C-alpha cells in the first residue's frame, strides 16, 4: 500500500518488529519517553509501519480492541473508559505512535491513521477509539482530527510524561474520510487533516486487501 514514497504495511515479521522498535525508541528517547519499548510478536495489537524504499521504518502506529484484559489506557483512565463501555460502545485504542521528523510526516501520519481506522472499524468492530496524547499534541488531535478530551492530564508512567485521554468515534472519522479523503491540496481552506487520507475508493480497496491478508 503506497502513498507518495512510503509503503504502508502490517508488521508481521521479526525484522519488521525490530525495525519498528528501533524507530519508536529513537523518537521516544529524543522526547525523554524511554528507550526500552518493544513490539511483541504475540501482542493483541496490530502494528502498521510506513517504510522507505530501503525498508527502514519511518513511521508507526499500533491499534487494538478492548478485551477482558482491558486497554493500556485503563492504567490511568479506567473510570473514563468504563463510562464509554457502560453505554455499549466497543472501544479500542491507538498506541505507540512514532514518526521520524526527517520524512514527509503529514502524509505518512495520514496513511497510518487511515489503515488503523479501517482495521479498527472493519476487523475489530470498534465504535470508538481512544489515544493518550502528550499535551503538546492535544490541539492537533482536537482541531484537525475531531478527538475529544476526557478530563485533565495525568502522568503516564510508561513514558514518564503527562498525557491526556482523548477519543473519537469511528463513525465520525469514516464520515470525514468520505467527505474529504484524497482531496489533498484541493482543500487548503479546510481546517482538517482528513484531506490527506486516502480517497474513499482507495480506502475500500485497502479494506479488501487488509481483510485478505488476515
Image: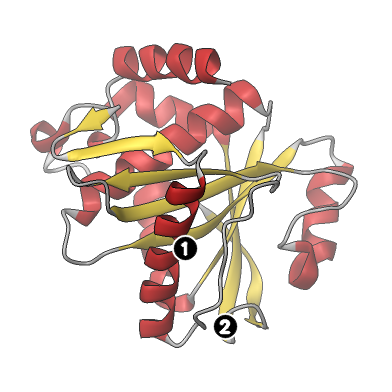
Q: Residue at x 50, y 42 (%)?
A: 13
User: At numbered mark 1, what does the secondary structure look like: helix, strand or loop?
Assistant: helix
- Using the image as rendered, state which of residue 170 and residue 87 is in the foreground: 170
Q: In which quadrant will I find the C terminus?
A: top right
User: At numbered mark 2, what does the secondary structure look like: helix, strand or loop?
Assistant: strand
Tell me residue 109's x, y (percent).
Answer: 32, 49
Relative to 102, residue 43 above or below: above
Q: Is residue 14 left or right of residue 165?
A: left
Mark whose residue sits in front, 2 or 1: 1
Q: Residue at x 43, y 48 (%)?
A: 16
User: Gap in Å between the C-alphas at discs 2 and 1?
Assistant: 22 Å
Examine the image and state in which quarter residue 100 appears.
Answer: bottom left
Circle 1 is placed at which residue position? 21
Q: Residue at x 68, y 32 (%)?
A: 126
Tell me residue 51's x, y (percent).
Answer: 28, 46
Tell me residue 186's x, y (percent).
Answer: 9, 31
Coloration of the structure image:
secondary structure
Tell me if residue 191 can be seen: no
Tell me residue 119's x, y (percent).
Answer: 55, 29
- Using the image as rendered, state which of residue 102 and residue 93 is in the foreground: 102
Examine the image and state in which quarter residue 82 appears.
Answer: bottom right
Q: Is residue 93 left or right of residue 1?
A: right
Circle 2 is placed at which residue position? 162
Tell me if residue 198 can be seen: yes
Would you call the spot at circle 2 few (<14 residues within 10 Å), some (14-19), or many (20 or more)?
some
Relative to 194, residue 144 above or below: below
Relative to 26, residue 22 above or below: above
Q: In which quadrant will I find the N terminus?
A: top left
Amino acid at each position: 500500500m503506497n502513498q507518495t514514497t512510503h509503503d504502508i504495511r502490517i508488521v508481521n515479521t521479526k525484522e519488521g518488529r525490530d525495525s519498528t522498535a528501533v524507530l519508536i525508541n529513537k523518537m521516544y528517547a529524543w522526547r525523554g519517553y524511554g528507550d526500552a519499548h518493544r513490539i511483541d510478536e504475540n501482542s493483541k495489537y496490530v502494528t502498521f509501519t510506513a517504510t522507505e524504499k530501503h525498508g527502514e521504518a519511518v513511521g508507526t502506529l499500533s491499534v487494538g480492541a478492548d478485551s477482558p484484559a482491558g486497554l493500556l489506557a485503563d492504567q490511568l483512565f479506567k473510570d473514563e473508559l468504563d463510562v464509554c463501555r457502560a453505554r455499549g460502545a466497543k472501544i479500542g485504542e491507538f498506541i505507540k505512535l512514532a514518526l521520524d521528523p526527517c520524512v514527509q510526516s503529514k502524509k505518512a501520519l495520514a496513511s497510518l491513521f487511515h489503515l488503523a481506522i479501517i482495521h479498527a472499524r472493519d476487523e475489530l468492530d470498534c465504535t470508538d477509539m481512544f489515544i493518550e496524547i502528550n499535551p503538546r499534541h492535544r490541539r492537533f488531535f482536537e482541531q484537525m482530527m475531531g478527538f475529544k478530551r476526557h478530563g485533565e492530564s495525568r502522568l503516564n508512567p510508561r513514558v514518564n510524561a503527562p498525557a491526556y485521554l482523548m477519543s473519537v468515534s469511528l463513525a465520525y472519522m469514516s464520515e470525514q474520510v468520505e467527505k474529504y479523503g484524497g482531496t489533498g491540496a484541493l482543500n487548503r481552506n479546510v481546517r482538517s487533516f482528513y484531506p490527506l487520507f486516502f480517497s474513499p475508493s482507495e480506502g475500500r480497496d485497502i479494506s479488501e486487501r487488509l481483510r485478505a491478508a488476515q
